[in-house]
């Protein structure tokens, strides 16, 4: 299942693959392990092996990744990919970009935070940018006073998101 396509033309799945690949040259099977249900990144966004390979194809087609080499031991031939400079720039831009809606925090923001932490980059700038981006939305949703069950759900999500961002800022500001 492909997730939404971002303004940069890559899906969240493709950014997840690009983010894992940016850590070191790798083959699709190893990337798929990181994005599997039990993987560190997979607990945020689970991506099956076929989608990992499809994402790698798209990343190569877009110039964001390239084939570094092929390996063959006793098993099947493995293609090892690496991120290009264009791919690294695109990833850095995406990682710095806050999400536009509270609903996008569940996957997009958590994925960005995980990839930043895995690369040992402080996420504090993203967290602060995220707080600024959602400030008006969170304030509006926090003051609805509505009896409508949908608005009440949104209000509670907004309050939880605001508290989460505050806690994150305190957590990483000390680090």
Image: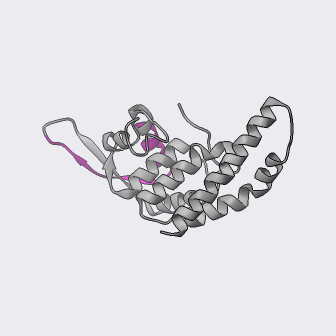
Q: Is residue 61 visible?
A: no
The span shown in magenta is 53-73
Taking depth in this image into account, of 80 and 33 the one nearest to the observer is 33
Number of numbered discs on residues: 0
Establish if 107 lies above or below 1. Answer: below
163, 62: nearer the viewer: 163
**Residue sitting at 47 percent across and 61 percent down?**
88
- Residue 84, by quadrant, is bottom left
* Residue at 66 percent of width and 58 percent of height: 130
Measuring from the top left, give residue 69's x and y in whole percent.
27, 52
The residue sitting at 49% across, 61% down in the picture is 86
x, y percent for residue 120: 42, 64
Report if residue 63 lies within the magenta region: yes
Seen as rendered, the residue at the extreme bottom is 174
Relative placement, left or right, of 146 versus 135 is: right
Note whether 69 is above or below 170 in the view shown: above
Q: How is the image coloured?
A: one colour
Q: Is residue 96 magenta?
A: no
Asked where in the image residue 118 lies, by quadrant, the reply is bottom left
Residue 155: x and y in percent read 76, 42
- How far from the left and from the top, in percent, is residue 42? 43, 40
Question: Can residue 78 be seen by looking at this rendering?
Answer: yes
Most foreground residue, 35 or 157: 157
Nearest to the observer: residue 42 or residue 58: 42
Compared to residue 80, the image places residue 133 above or below, namely below
Residue at 26% in and 42% down: 78
């Amino acid at each position: 299942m492909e997730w939404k396509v971002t303004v940069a033309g890559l899906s969240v799945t493709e950014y997840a693959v690009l983010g894992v690949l940016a850590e070191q040259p790798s083959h699709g099977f190893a990337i798929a392990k990181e994005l599997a249900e039990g993987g560190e990144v997979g607990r945020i966004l689970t991506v099956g092996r076929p989608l990992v390979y499809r994402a790698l194809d798209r990343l190569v087609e877009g110039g964001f990744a390239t084939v570094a080499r092929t390996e063959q031991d006793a098993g099947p031939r493995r293609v090892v990919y690496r991120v290009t400079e264009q791919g690294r720039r695109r990833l850095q831009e995406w990682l710095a970009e806050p999400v536009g809606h509270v609903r996008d925090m569940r996957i997009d923001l958590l994925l960005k935070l995980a990839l930043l932490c895995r690369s040992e980059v402080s996420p504090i700038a993203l967290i602060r940018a995220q707080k600024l981006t959602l400030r008006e939305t969170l304030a509006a949703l926090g003051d609805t006073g509505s009896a409508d069950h949908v608005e009440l759900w949104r209000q509670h999500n907004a309050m939880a998101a605001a508290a989460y961002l505050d806690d994150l800022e305190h957590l990483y500001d000390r680090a």
